[in-house]
Amino acid sequence: MKVFLGSDKAGLELKNVIKTYINKEINDLEVIDTTPEGAEDFVESSLAVTKSIKDNEGSTGILFDETGAGSFMAASKIKGIITAEISDEHSAKMTRDHNNASLITLGSGIVGDRLAKKITKTFLSAEYSGGRHQIRVDMLDAMC
Protein backbone atom coordinates (compact mmCIF):
# COMPACT_ATOMS: atom_id res chain seq x y z
CA MET A 1 0.00 0.00 0.00
CA LYS A 2 1.18 3.51 -0.78
CA VAL A 3 1.18 6.11 1.98
CA PHE A 4 1.44 9.72 0.83
CA LEU A 5 2.83 12.27 3.27
CA GLY A 6 2.68 16.03 3.01
CA SER A 7 3.29 19.05 5.19
CA ASP A 8 3.63 22.76 5.25
CA LYS A 9 6.74 24.29 6.87
CA ALA A 10 5.20 24.04 10.38
CA GLY A 11 4.60 20.30 10.01
CA LEU A 12 7.86 19.43 8.26
CA GLU A 13 9.77 18.16 11.28
CA LEU A 14 6.96 15.85 12.48
CA LYS A 15 6.40 14.60 8.93
CA ASN A 16 10.06 13.62 8.71
CA VAL A 17 9.87 11.81 12.05
CA ILE A 18 6.85 9.83 10.83
CA LYS A 19 8.41 9.12 7.43
CA THR A 20 11.46 7.60 9.13
CA TYR A 21 9.24 5.70 11.57
CA ILE A 22 7.09 4.13 8.84
CA ASN A 23 10.11 3.17 6.75
CA LYS A 24 11.85 1.50 9.72
CA GLU A 25 8.97 0.08 11.77
CA ILE A 26 6.00 -0.70 9.53
CA ASN A 27 6.38 -3.29 6.80
CA ASP A 28 4.82 -3.57 3.34
CA LEU A 29 4.22 0.15 2.85
CA GLU A 30 5.60 2.44 0.19
CA VAL A 31 6.07 5.91 1.65
CA ILE A 32 5.94 8.80 -0.80
CA ASP A 33 6.72 12.29 0.43
CA THR A 34 4.83 14.78 -1.73
CA THR A 35 6.46 17.82 -0.09
CA PRO A 36 10.09 16.99 0.80
CA GLU A 37 10.91 20.60 1.72
CA GLY A 38 7.50 21.42 3.19
CA ALA A 39 4.98 23.44 1.24
CA GLU A 40 4.64 27.17 1.88
CA ASP A 41 0.96 26.67 2.69
CA PHE A 42 -1.13 23.79 4.02
CA VAL A 43 -3.48 24.11 1.04
CA GLU A 44 -0.62 23.18 -1.31
CA SER A 45 0.40 20.13 0.71
CA SER A 46 -3.24 19.07 1.08
CA LEU A 47 -3.80 19.24 -2.67
CA ALA A 48 -0.61 17.27 -3.36
CA VAL A 49 -1.60 14.43 -1.03
CA THR A 50 -5.29 14.28 -1.96
CA LYS A 51 -4.47 14.20 -5.68
CA SER A 52 -1.98 11.38 -5.07
CA ILE A 53 -4.54 9.37 -3.09
CA LYS A 54 -7.17 9.83 -5.79
CA ASP A 55 -4.68 8.77 -8.48
CA ASN A 56 -3.64 5.64 -6.53
CA GLU A 57 -6.64 3.54 -5.52
CA GLY A 58 -6.29 1.89 -2.13
CA SER A 59 -3.65 4.33 -0.91
CA THR A 60 -3.73 6.44 2.24
CA GLY A 61 -2.14 9.62 3.44
CA ILE A 62 -1.14 11.75 6.38
CA LEU A 63 -0.92 15.53 6.37
CA PHE A 64 0.97 17.65 8.90
CA ASP A 65 0.65 21.30 9.84
CA GLU A 66 0.71 23.26 13.12
CA THR A 67 -2.72 22.20 14.37
CA GLY A 68 -3.96 19.68 11.80
CA ALA A 69 -7.03 21.87 11.32
CA GLY A 70 -5.94 23.73 8.19
CA SER A 71 -4.97 20.57 6.34
CA PHE A 72 -8.20 18.94 7.46
CA MET A 73 -10.30 21.82 6.13
CA ALA A 74 -8.49 21.86 2.78
CA ALA A 75 -8.51 18.07 2.27
CA SER A 76 -12.16 17.68 3.26
CA LYS A 77 -13.13 19.85 0.28
CA ILE A 78 -11.97 17.18 -2.18
CA LYS A 79 -14.64 14.78 -3.43
CA GLY A 80 -13.80 11.16 -2.77
CA ILE A 81 -11.45 11.93 0.13
CA ILE A 82 -12.62 11.22 3.66
CA THR A 83 -10.36 13.03 6.08
CA ALA A 84 -10.15 13.20 9.86
CA GLU A 85 -8.20 15.53 12.11
CA ILE A 86 -6.67 13.19 14.71
CA SER A 87 -4.97 13.66 18.06
CA ASP A 88 -5.52 10.26 19.71
CA GLU A 89 -5.15 6.57 18.89
CA HIS A 90 -8.79 5.58 19.34
CA SER A 91 -10.00 8.16 16.81
CA ALA A 92 -7.31 7.00 14.37
CA LYS A 93 -8.69 3.47 14.53
CA MET A 94 -12.37 4.39 14.44
CA THR A 95 -12.13 6.86 11.54
CA ARG A 96 -10.64 4.08 9.44
CA ASP A 97 -12.88 1.31 10.82
CA HIS A 98 -16.23 3.12 10.61
CA ASN A 99 -15.66 5.98 8.16
CA ASN A 100 -13.19 4.47 5.68
CA ALA A 101 -10.97 7.54 6.00
CA SER A 102 -8.14 7.53 3.51
CA LEU A 103 -6.41 10.49 5.09
CA ILE A 104 -5.66 11.87 8.53
CA THR A 105 -4.17 15.17 9.60
CA LEU A 106 -1.86 15.70 12.55
CA GLY A 107 -0.89 18.93 14.25
CA SER A 108 2.81 19.25 15.03
CA GLY A 109 1.95 21.68 17.83
CA ILE A 110 -0.71 19.33 19.22
CA VAL A 111 0.82 15.84 19.23
CA GLY A 112 4.41 14.97 20.02
CA ASP A 113 6.57 12.48 18.18
CA ARG A 114 5.68 9.52 20.40
CA LEU A 115 1.92 9.99 20.15
CA ALA A 116 2.17 10.72 16.41
CA LYS A 117 3.93 7.36 15.93
CA LYS A 118 1.18 5.54 17.86
CA ILE A 119 -1.55 7.32 15.87
CA THR A 120 0.21 6.51 12.59
CA LYS A 121 0.61 2.83 13.43
CA THR A 122 -3.01 2.57 14.56
CA PHE A 123 -4.38 4.32 11.47
CA LEU A 124 -2.27 2.35 9.00
CA SER A 125 -3.07 -1.01 10.60
CA ALA A 126 -6.83 -0.42 10.92
CA GLU A 127 -9.23 -1.70 8.27
CA TYR A 128 -12.61 -0.53 7.11
CA SER A 129 -15.47 -2.66 8.48
CA GLY A 130 -17.93 -1.82 5.71
CA GLY A 131 -21.44 -3.13 6.23
CA ARG A 132 -23.77 -0.70 7.97
CA HIS A 133 -21.06 1.99 7.86
CA GLN A 134 -21.15 2.19 4.06
CA ILE A 135 -24.36 4.24 4.16
CA ARG A 136 -22.53 6.96 6.11
CA VAL A 137 -19.49 6.79 3.84
CA ASP A 138 -21.72 7.27 0.80
CA MET A 139 -23.46 10.19 2.50
CA LEU A 140 -20.13 11.87 3.25
CA ASP A 141 -18.96 11.47 -0.31
CA ALA A 142 -22.22 12.86 -1.70
CA MET A 143 -21.70 16.07 0.27
CA CYS A 144 -18.75 17.25 -1.83
Image (cartoon, rainbow, N blue to C red):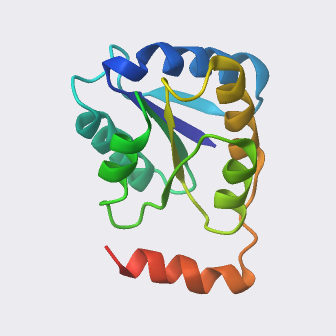
Q: Report x, y in % for residue 80.
A: 41, 66
Q: Quadrant of the C terminus?
A: bottom left
Q: Front-most of 21 and 114?
A: 114
Q: Report x, y in % for residue 73.
A: 33, 52
**Left or right for 3, reference 73:** right
Q: Give the quadrant of residue 63.
A: top left
- Point 29% across, 34% down: residue: 42
* Image height of 109 relative to 126, above or below: above
* Image height of 16 relative to 121, above or below: above
- Point 37% across, 58% down: residue: 76
**Left or right for 104, reference 41:** right
- Point 27% across, 24% down: residue: 39
**Left or right for 134, reference 82:** right
Q: Report x, y in % for residue 12.
A: 42, 17
- Point 73% across, 83% down: residue: 131
* Image height of 93 relative to 144, above or below: above
Count of number-bearing discs: 0
Q: Give the quadrant of residue 1.
A: top right
Q: Report x, y in % for residue 71.
A: 36, 42
**Left or right for 12, reference 111:** left
Q: Give the quadrant of residue 141.
A: bottom left
